[in-house]
């Protein structure tokens, strides 16, 4: 039977079989952030203006000047949009008259077209070496991260210092890129090919808020679980494996820092609680 139990209510007290929840600790874990310029081909939904142009054509306004009058836009704007739609194969043009290539076209469907984009993107990798000594790479928004400067301004905060600052070269990013497309896909894009990835800002350490749960087992072992502190409370499997490895090697608390004097007593009490439950469960 698997060790893992799924709880829809996000109650993790029974997460591990034959293990009792011994305590928890709020902690900020490090991510290494890089700012990139990414150039890639994708299939993406057409824009609102492009939908308006298609709507005009669908309603019988089939020449460019007519669309300019209806939308009250300059000819350079309309010509650019129409040319893009033609290039994507959504619109056709014959003898100066525009038509939709799909006669069953529905505006609500927001059809996708092949597009070439050059955008700023954020790439992060976890700042703790995992058990396999591999970089856990992913693109992600950083709305919930905090800088080390802001972190140190707060009281009673625990955080781990990063133990990995692997140098990643631009040419290596392209090879990693298939794993990194969570960020662009927020826009419902289907990435077809990455043309280039350029580093525009060097590595920066940022922190995310997590909770570490400690479970004592009947066999005298301790298992850990790491999940995000946010509305979703999603379990982070990569950080769980990494933090478990650090704990097993007695490195976790040595690598941990706190922002307020005396907070180390909380770690001592947590260790006592874990030891007590392990002793009474035997």
Image (cartoon, rainbow, N blue to C red):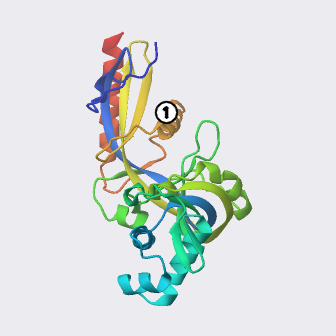
Q: Position of residue 185 (x, y in %)?
A: 50, 54
195 vs 215, left or right, is right
Residue farthest right in this picture: 171
Q: Which residue is at the front of the view, 66 or 209?
A: 66
Please provide percent x and percent y for residue 248.
Answer: 51, 30
Residue sitting at 58 percent across and 73 percent down? 93
SS of the residue at dot 1? helix
Seen in the picture, residue 234 relative to 216 is either above or below; the reply is: below
Most extreme residue toward the front is 95
- The answer to whether residue 228 is left or right of residue 173 is left
Name the residue: 51% across, 34% down. 241
200 with respect to 31 (left or right):
right
Q: Nearer the viewer, residue 245 or 193?
A: 193
Q: Nearer the viewer, residue 36 or 219?
A: 36
What's the residue at 40%, 37% (across, down)? 235
Q: Position of residue 120 (x, y in %)?
A: 54, 70
Q: Give whichever of 65, 87 is nearer the camera.
A: 65
């Amino acid at each position: 039977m698997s060790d893992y139990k799924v709880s829809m209510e996000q109650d993790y007290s029974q997460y591990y079989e034959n293990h009792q929840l011994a305590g928890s600790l709020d902690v900020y874990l490090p991510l290494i952030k890089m700012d990139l310029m990414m150039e890639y081909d994708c299939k993406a939904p057409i824009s609102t203006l492009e939908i308006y142009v298609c709507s005009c054509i669908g309603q019988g306004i089939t020449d460019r000047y007519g669309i300019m009058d209806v939308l009250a836009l300059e000819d350079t704007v309309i010509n650019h949009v129409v040319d893009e739609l033609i290039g994507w194969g959504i619109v056709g043009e014959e003898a100066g008259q525009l038509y939709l290539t799909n006669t069953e076209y529905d505006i609500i469907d927001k059809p996708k077209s092949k597009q070439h984009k050059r955008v700023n993107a954020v790439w992060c990798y976890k700042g703790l070496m995992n058990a396999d000594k591999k970089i856990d790479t992913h693109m992600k928004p950083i709305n919930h991260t905090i800088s080390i400067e802001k972190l140190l301004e707060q009281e009673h905060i625990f955080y781990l210092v990063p133990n990995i600052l692997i140098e990643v070269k631009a040419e290596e990013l392209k090879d990693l890129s298939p794993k990194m497309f969570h960020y662009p896909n927020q826009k419902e894009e289907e990435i077809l090919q990455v043309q280039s990835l350029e580093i525009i800002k060097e590595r920066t350490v940022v922190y995310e808020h997590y909770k570490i749960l400690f479970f004592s087992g009947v066999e005298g072992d301790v298992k850990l679980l790491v999940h995000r502190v946010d509305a979703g409370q999603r379990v982070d499997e990569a950080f769980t494996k990494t933090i478990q490895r650090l704990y097993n090697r007695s490195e976790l608390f040595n690598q941990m820092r706190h922002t307020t004097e005396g907070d180390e007593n909380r770690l001592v009490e947590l260790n006592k609680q874990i030891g007590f439950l392990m002793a009474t469960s035997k």
